């Protein structure tokens, strides 16, 4: 009791001071919170404050967890906890109590509880789930204030997954008699729309009701939702455009209650919202724009009071006018408006004027010309924000003639700017302009140097990336390339001779790469000099290890002869014991390559930056190593699926003794040329390192450009290189000569510019800035798409180089993925696969089927071609095993019956057993597949076993591994009573797998009945898609090298009397339709393809009573799958 | 709107409302850096600021800075007027508001803000309606306070 008395006493002063005024709680400074706040203000140091708050938090914690604390006290405690959190001290212990307060308190305490929850938690906080029940209860409360509170908290945060629980209640509130409730409900739905749009899809028509609400507040609230929805899908709401226009007209005409006026402007928020909606609806839509012109004009006219709020509306109006379909007199008015903004002495308006100018300048460059003097003044404005926005305008009006002045201004800004975000943005823009409009080499290199030194390590990695790419790929003229590179070399050498310690790491990396690659162009420059300069970088304290590895790579390219070698040796000595593995690797390379100049020249040929790179992802250079290891008794590698299968087999009792692991001394050279052992260490090291590189985060993309040459097979196929090079004919295109350009410049700078009489200097600046913006040149010079004479026009073969940075990461050492692909295709074409694909055994069939197609089904005895026959039983056999559905035994006569329904063009070919798919009382589905030379056809027979006709039968097939395309005219079939409808599908494999499965649905309907559907699946072995591939041994050799996916395994030999290798290959040939290319002694090479044209090669070799099989293909899973089938085929034999 | 901050000339935070979900750490970092940036600006400078990837609109009233972060396509001027309207509301409610009112009654300031801006959007732009809503809730409070007094009196 005494407790209560005491509390009452302490509360008394504040209670007594209460009078009826709403603002009366002012004096609550005597409360505990007041004491706390005053306590804090009296403190002098941060440290004392911390101590005090910690003490406070301890006491709050104690009290909130005490069971005796009343909700009223809890409310007070929460307010204090909020205060502590605002000061930056964590009070997470109170979160749960805030929820409790919202749950259990009376209306008022609830209010504080909800407030605390909304301040403490964010929408992903797990404790929020505990609030759901409270919200649910309050939404159903009869107390309006409680409902309001619940809706308020819901519109701020609510767990996404729980929306369905309260959605009906919130929806119901849209019909509430009180407008405040309706308004809050609309905003709650807006919140739901933002976080889970699909949850509120079904109530879109209720939004329309809210839009038509008699209360302007509710209507305004609904516009938030509409703005959002229209932004996402403007097409869907065109019909509302007229309504929005009407509303805006009413608002502008002052039809709303006075309450909504703000400084005597009618409902400005509503106006702005509507203008934004209208600009979205009118964009690229002349007819919708048409209905807006009048009201826009009216808005412009009405907004005359000199107040911020009118300017806000005007600004939005101008933006709208420039966004929708243009109308000349409106544009004129809008332009005048922008002028008023730009010329305004008020800095905020000036800023918005510049922003509007930026927005419209591309459409209307003359406007920039009109305000050029203001723009020049703003360039020197003391407020950086104004300056920044001005540069933004200049960026958009840049052309080949004013680029130097504008870039100068931008770089000037960059030097004084301190904000990282602006630096990153602006540096990117400068680089873009430099690359696009550079007037000459010197300027370009110098500008980029400034970009690199100012942008430092902040800038987007694609800037140095694309710069290096530009240098290495060159332009249309060889001579220009040389000059540019030479100038870069000169400029970087002098930079290194200065104070390289001040340069950012990225820049040093660029420098190292360029020097490594191109310093030979400067003939009088000794490689040793460059090497010494580079070595100096290594000794600098703040050089990062990433930069060091760039430097080492550059040195590797340079250490040619004489003095250079000794520098290289010295450096590699130091770093070969580095703790950083990448550095150590580089040092090793440097060491080895500087010793063997011949090898170096082959590995790093000079000026070969353009050579397409190849990655030997199959690690074939390790073959020697692998075979050695195998010979030494190591177990051969098994792919995962095989290991699993073997594991499964092993569970059953194995009767065989442990199989000897076979020493395969497969000398890969016997098949095709391979790496020489000398290179082996380097190349393996490199490829081993690639993942390392990609781990290096953002900068790794940069690095790849540095790793220019692959220690790939190119060295071996040296005689090929010139051929490839000649294919890439350099087409010199007429670049503008400097003199011509100068002429153009002068002619343009003479364009008369109407200005009053400012100082000479500014006028000069203006004429240089706005050159090329004269009235007749207007848009075409501004338009970015316009093909202005671009100096550094990239070659067409590498589009979008800068954006491919991320792609490159994954490809590690490859320059661009496409190069590899192209190369592969080239090789494939080289070997004439396409022309010689037809395998002898099928040749006849193909001719036949062609003949059949022409003669439409006059088949004859020739059909029983022995080869086809030979393969058919195995096909059927295979199929019977593979078919998933436990087939109830076929009625032979039905089978026959169905066979007769095989389409004529297929009837000549071997087909698999007809397998029943599914059936019910009215339909009976069966299927069979037919192997054609270039496709696999799936035939589905639909037998109508009912007594009535079925008009519409829809058959849909789908598969993860296969691409299914319908051969028949339409997907819809009909089947009259007791007859058969046939559907044909052509199948090709998307992703190989051991078995592929097609799932399907057949849906149909009797004339008078409900729709029905049946589902089925059909499984096929991959072997159905395998066709022979005819290649010569040489072609086989080249292809073998190009394929990256492989698998090796030992298979059982078949030895029924004759020569085992030939016998085994024969079985494989028959069962799997492989093509035996050649048998050379103990080895055989076999080729096949997966429909359509995915080759797979097999190399096999007799080895101690088993067959060592090695499969290779460009398709990832194909070798493994084929290996499985080979194994099965031999086992079954 | 992404958030609204009120802070004093000394850089003390007086009110914070976040409309985008951020971690406490991010919030603190943004607050610290933004307060510094805004305080460093001279009085005659532009009220708009491109800061990080955000657009900041701020205005100073006496010793208090009101600072909002908005989306790039939002209208800066109208945001400035949102701040002004909020100050008007506070002024009307407290009766010529001063920093101390907001410090000692910050929960009230939050209630008013929630009645005016909801989920980062202007909810009710009629001054009368906002104040009516707040007064109704306050009235409830007074009724209870009154009952409490009655109850407390005998003991």
Image: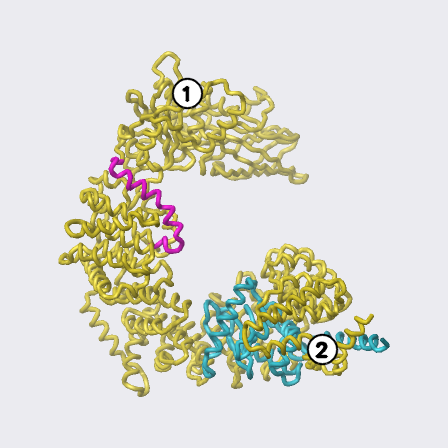
Chain colours: A yellow, B cyan
| Distance in Å between CA atoms under marks 1 and 2 | 91 Å
> x and y percent of residue B23 in the render?
55, 62
Q: Secondary structure at mark 2?
A: helix
Is A70 in the magenta? no
Q: Seen from this angle, which residue lies furthest bottom?
A: A757
Tell me which segment is drawn in magenta: A675-702
Name the residue beneath numbered marker 2: B135
Name the residue beneath numbered marker 1: A1052
Q: Seen from this angle, which residue lies furthest right?
A: B154
Please count the marks in the image.
2
On the question of residue A905 being in view, the answer is no
Left or right for B57, reference A593: right
Q: Seen from this angle, which residue lies furthest top?
A: A1057
Q: Nearer the viewer, residue A1048 or A790?
A: A1048
The crowding category of the residue bearing disc 1, from other C-alpha atoms within 10 Å (few below 14, some 14 to 19, many at least 20), is some
Quadrant of the image containing the N terminus of chain A:
bottom right
């Amino acid at each position: 009791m005494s407790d209560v008395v005491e509390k009452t006493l302490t509360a008394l002063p504040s209670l007594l001071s209460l009078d009826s005024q709403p603002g009366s709680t002012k004096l609550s400074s005597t409360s505990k919170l007041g004491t706390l706040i005053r306590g804090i203000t009296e403190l002098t140091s941060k440290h004392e404050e911390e101590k005090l708050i910690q003490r406070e938090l301890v006491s709050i914690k104690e009290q909130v967890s005490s069971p005796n604390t009343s909700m009223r006290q809890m409310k007070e405690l929460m307010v204090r906890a909020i205060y502590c959190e605002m000061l930056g001290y964590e009070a997470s212990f109170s979160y749960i109590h805030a929820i409790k307060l919202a749950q259990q308190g009376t209306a008022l305490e609830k209010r504080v509880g909800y407030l605390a929850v909304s301040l403490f938690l964010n929408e992903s906080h797990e404790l929020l789930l505990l609030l759901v029940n409270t919200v649910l209860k309050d939404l159903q409360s009869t107390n309006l204030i409680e409902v309001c509170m619940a809706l308020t908290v819901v519109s701020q945060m609510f767990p996404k997954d729980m929306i369905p629980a309260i959605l009906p209640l919130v929806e119901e509130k849209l019909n509430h008699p009180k407008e405040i409730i309706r308004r809050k409900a609309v905003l709650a739905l807006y919140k739901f729309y933002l976080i889970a749009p699909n949850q509120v899809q079904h109530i879109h028509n209720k939004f329309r009701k809210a839009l038509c609400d008699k209360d302007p507040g509710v209507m305004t609230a609904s516009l938030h939702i509409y703005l959002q929805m229209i932004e996402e899908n403007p097409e869907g709401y065109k019909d509302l455009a007229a309504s929005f226009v009407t509303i805006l007209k009413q608002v502008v005409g002052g039809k709303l209650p006075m309450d909504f006026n703000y400084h005597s402007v009618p409902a400005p928020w509503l106006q702005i919202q509507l203008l934004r909606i209208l600009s979205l609806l009118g964009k690229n839509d002349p007819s919708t724009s048409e209905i807006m012109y009048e009201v826009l004009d009216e808005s412009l006219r009405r907004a005359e009071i000199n107040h911020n709020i009118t300017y806000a509306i005007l600004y939005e109006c101008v933006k709208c006018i420039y966004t929708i379909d243009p109308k000349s007199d409106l544009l004129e008015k809008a332009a005048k408006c922008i002028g008023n903004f730009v010329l305004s002495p008020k800095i905020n308006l000036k800023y918005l004027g510049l922003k509007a100018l930026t927005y419209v300048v591309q459409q209307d460059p003359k406007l920039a010309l009109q305000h050029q003097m203001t723009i020049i003044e703003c360039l020197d404005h003391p407020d950086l924000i104004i300056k920044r926005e001005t540069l933004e305008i200049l960026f958009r009006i840049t052309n080949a003639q004013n680029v130097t002045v504008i870039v100068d201004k931008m770089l000037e800004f960059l030097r004084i700017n301190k904000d990282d975000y602006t630096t990153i943005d602006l540096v990117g823009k400068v680089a873009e302009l430099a690359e696009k409009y550079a007037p000459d080499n010197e300027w370009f290199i110098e500008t980029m140097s400034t970009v690199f030194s100012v942008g430092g390590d902040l800038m987007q990695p694609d800037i140095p990336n694309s710069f290096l790419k530009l240098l290495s790929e060159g332009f249309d003229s060889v001579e220009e390339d040389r000059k540019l590179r030479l100038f870069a070399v000169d400029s970087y050498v002098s930079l290194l001779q200065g104070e390289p310690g001040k340069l950012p790491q990225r820049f040093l990396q660029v420098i190292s790469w360029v020097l490594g690659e191109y310093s030979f162009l400067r003939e009088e420059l000794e490689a040793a000099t460059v090497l010494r300069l580079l070595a100096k970088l290594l000794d600098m304290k703040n050089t990062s290890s990433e930069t060091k590895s760039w430097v080492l790579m550059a040195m590797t390219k340079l250490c040619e002869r004489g003095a250079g070698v000794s520098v290289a040796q010295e450096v590699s000595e130091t770093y070969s014991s580095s703790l950083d593995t990448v550095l150590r690797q580089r040092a090793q390379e440097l060491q080895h390559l500087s010793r063997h100049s011949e090898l170096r020249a082959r590995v790093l040929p000079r000026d070969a930056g353009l050579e397409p790179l190849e990655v030997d992802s199959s690690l074939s250079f390790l073959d020697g190593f692998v075979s050695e290891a195998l010979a030494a008794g190591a177990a051969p590698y098994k792919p995962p699926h095989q290991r699993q299968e073997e594991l499964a087999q092993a569970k059953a009792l194995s009767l065989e003794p442990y199989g000897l692991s076979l020493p395969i001394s497969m000398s890969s050279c016997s098949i095709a040329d391979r790496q020489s052992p000398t290179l082996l260490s380097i190349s393996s090291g490199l490829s081993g390192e690639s993942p390392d590189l990609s781990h290096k985060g953002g900068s790794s993309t940069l690095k790849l450009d540095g790793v220019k040459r692959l220690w790939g097979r190119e060295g071996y196929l040296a005689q090929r290189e010139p051929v490839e090079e000649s294919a890439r004919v350099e087409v010199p295109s007429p670049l503008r000569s400097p003199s011509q350009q100068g002429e153009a410049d002068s002619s343009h700078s003479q364009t008369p510019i109407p200005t009053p009489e400012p100082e000479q200097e500014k006028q000069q600046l203006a004429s240089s800035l706005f050159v090329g913006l004269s009235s007749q040149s207007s848009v075409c010079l501004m338009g970015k798409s316009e093909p202005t004479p671009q100096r550094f026009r990239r070659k067409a073969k590498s589009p979008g180089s800068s954006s491919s940075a991320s792609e490159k990461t994954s490809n590690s050492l490859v320059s661009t993925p496409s190069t590899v692909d192209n190369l592969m295709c080239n090789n494939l074409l080289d070997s004439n696969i396409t022309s010689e694909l037809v395998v002898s055994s099928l040749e006849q069939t193909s001719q036949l089927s062609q003949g059949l197609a022409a003669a439409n089904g006059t088949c004859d005895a020739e059909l029983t071609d022995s080869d086809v026959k030979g393969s058919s039983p195995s096909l059927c056999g295979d199929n019977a095993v593979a078919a998933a559905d436990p087939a109830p035994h076929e009625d032979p006569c039905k089978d026959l019956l169905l066979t007769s329904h095989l389409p004529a063009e297929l009837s000549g070919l071997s087909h698999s057993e007809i397998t029943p798919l599914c059936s019910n009382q009215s339909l009976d589905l069966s299927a069979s597949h037919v192997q054609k030379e270039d496709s696999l056809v799936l035939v589905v027979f639909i037998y109508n076993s009912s007594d009535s006709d079925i008009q519409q039968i829809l058959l849909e097939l789908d598969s993860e591994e296969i691409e299914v395309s319908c051969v028949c005219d339409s997907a819809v079939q009909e089947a009259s009573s007791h007859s058969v409808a046939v559907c044909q599908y052509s199948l090709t494999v998307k992703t190989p797998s051991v078995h592929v499965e097609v799932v399907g649905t057949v849906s149909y309907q009797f004339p008078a009945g409900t729709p029905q559907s049946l589902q089925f699946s059909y499984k096929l072995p991959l072997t159905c898609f395998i066709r022979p591939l005819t290649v010569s041994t040489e072609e086989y050799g080249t292809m073998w090298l190009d394929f990256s996916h492989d698998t090796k395994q030992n298979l059982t030999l078949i030895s029924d009397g004759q020569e085992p290798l030939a016998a085994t290959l024969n079985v494989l040939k028959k069962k799997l339709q492989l093509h035996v290319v050649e048998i050379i002694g103990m080895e055989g090479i076999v080729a096949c393809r997966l429909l359509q044209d995915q080759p797979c090669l097999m190399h096999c070799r007799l080895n101690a009573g088993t067959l060592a099989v090695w499969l290779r293909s460009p398709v990832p899973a194909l070798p493994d799958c084929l290996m499985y089938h080979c194994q099965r085929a031999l086992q079954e034999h | 709107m992404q958030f609204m901050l009120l802070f004093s000339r000394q850089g003390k935070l007086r009110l914070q409302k976040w409309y985008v979900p951020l971690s406490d750490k991010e919030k603190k970092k943004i607050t610290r850096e933004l307060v510094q940036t805004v305080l460093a600006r001279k009085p005659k400078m532009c009220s708009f600021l491109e800061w990080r990837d955000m657009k900041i609109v701020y205005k100073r009233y006496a010793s208090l800075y009101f600072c909002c972060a908005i989306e790039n396509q939002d209208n800066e001027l109208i945001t400035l007027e949102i701040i002004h309207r909020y100050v008007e509301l506070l002024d009307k409610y407290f009766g010529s508001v001063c920093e101390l009112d907001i410090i000692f009654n910050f929960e009230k300031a939050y209630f008013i803000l929630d009645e005016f801006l909801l989920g980062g959007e202007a909810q009710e732009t009629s001054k009368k309606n906002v104040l009516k809503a707040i007064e109704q809730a306050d009235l409830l409070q007074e009724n209870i306070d009154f009952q409490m007094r009655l109850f407390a009196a005998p003991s």
